Image (tube, rainbow, N blue to C red):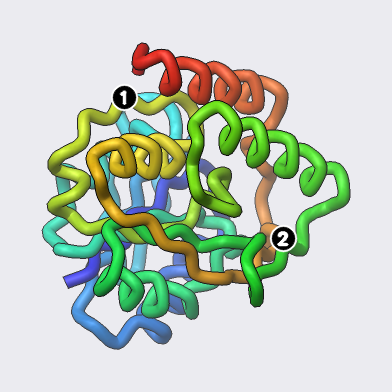
Amino acid sequence: MISIIIPTKNEPLINDLIRDINENVNEEHEIIVVDKSDAPPELVGGKLVEQKSDGLGNAFLEGMRHASGESIVLMDGDFSHDPKYIPLLVDALKNADVVIGSRFVDGGKTLDSHHRKLVSFFFRNFASLILNLPLHDSMSGFGAIRREVLEGLRLNPLGYKVLLEIAYKSKRLGCELAEVPIVFNKRRAGKTKAGLKEAFRTLILIVELRLGLR
């Protein structure tokens, strides 16, 4: 069983994404949408969890409490993460504990703006330097994790980069990390939630992880 967790806030195409996931994932799966919209969406083919906490990372933890799969997938709800990669991420869990959907390995690509590419370049290299993570795309928000690995971690998310925290803490426990190439698309509709506030939170997260404060 695969549990696919999608944190959302005012994502107008969430039902289109659910449909595409169901078309691309043939293995038994469940789709858990953890939503903090102004008005909760009416889902077709997915389970709605109304988020009580704040932040994407905490939304993931709330979704985990409703997940029953052995493989856990985290993805965005704006079509920047293509559902066709879900089977590849999950298949890679046969030889790894945490699998990252990477824009920056051979075969990967990002369609982001030049500005966002520069921002990502800075944060990826900063995280690699401070946390000594053997990843090309530590800022990715698309990945798959073994449930047993997640249950062995004490997560304390700050902002969006819960997958970075998962990768760092699981690596410290001796878990195996892997990357699968993906193409990162521009969002199809709605507004981005990223900004200076989230950038600052990411810097704090990286430093606090390194110092053992989180």
Type of the residue with mark 1: Asn
Query: Which of pointers 2 and 1 lies earlier in the amino acid sequence?
Result: 1
Q: Distance between the residues labelled 2 and 1?
A: 29 Å
Q: Is mark 1 on a helix, strand or loop?
A: loop
At a point 49% along the width and 41% down the height, the residue shown is: 133
Q: In which quarter of the image is residue 87?
A: bottom left
Which residue is pictured at 71% across the width and 42% down the height?
120
Q: Dots 2 and 1: beta carbons under 8 Å?
A: no
Q: Is residue 187 left or right of residue 22?
A: right
* Residue 74 falls left or right of residue 191: left
Residue 186 — which label? 2
The dot on residue 156 is 1
Vertically, is 53 above or below 191? above
Relative depth, front residue between 100 and 200: 100
The quadrant of the rendering that contains the N terminus is: bottom left
The residue that appears at 26% across and 50% down in the rendered structure is 175
Is there any visible trace of residue 158 in the rendered image? yes
Q: Which numbered marker is on residue 133?
A: none
Q: Where is residue 69 in the image (x, y as percent from the top left)?
A: 16, 63
Residue at horizontal 31 percent and vertical 24 percent from the top = 156
Q: In this view, does 184 lie to the left or right of 86?
A: right
Picture quadrant of residue 86:
bottom left
Depth check: give the residue in front, 77 or 196. Answer: 196
Residue 89: % across, % down = 39, 70
What is the three-letter code of the residue carrying label 2? Lys
- Residue 207 left/right relative to 51: right
- The relative height of residue 13 versus residue 117 in the rendered view (above or below) is below
In percent of width and height, residue 38 lies at: 49, 35
